[in-house]
Image (cartoon, rainbow, N blue to C red):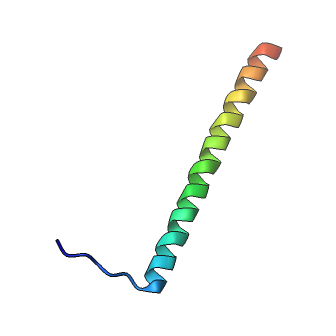
Amino acid sequence: MELIKLTAAQRKSRRNRNVALGLVLAGLVILFYAITIVKIGGGMAG
């Protein structure tokens, strides 16, 4: 099996992309959580 050597720029780019994806996923989780809380709260109030 041949290992691919990444340059420093490629490693930095990959890390930045992974961090961005993580932030997007976390944002979606928070968004869905907030929507759920609003729906449940609205159902109880009405």
Is 43 drawn above or below residue 32 in the view shown? above
Q: Is residue 29 visible?
A: yes
Is 32 drawn above or below residue 7 in the view shown? above
Q: Which part of the image, by quadrant, shows the C terminus?
A: top right
Q: Which part of the image, by quadrant, shows the N terminus?
A: bottom left
Residue located 61% across and 57% down the image: 23
**Snapshot quadrant of residue 35:** top right
Residue located 63% across and 37% down the image: 32
Outermost left residue: 1
Please state the total of marks drawn on the protein image.
Answer: 0
Q: Where is residue 37 in the image (x, y as percent from the top left)?
A: 72, 28
* Left or right, 46 with reference to 25: right
Q: Where is residue 24 in the image (x, y as percent from the top left)?
A: 59, 55
> Of residues 14 and 46, which is closer to you in this image?
14
Q: Where is residue 34 in the image (x, y as percent from the top left)?
A: 71, 36
Residue located 53% across and 59% down the image: 21
Is 44 drawn above or below residue 1 in the view shown? above
Is 6 drawn above or below residue 36 in the view shown? below
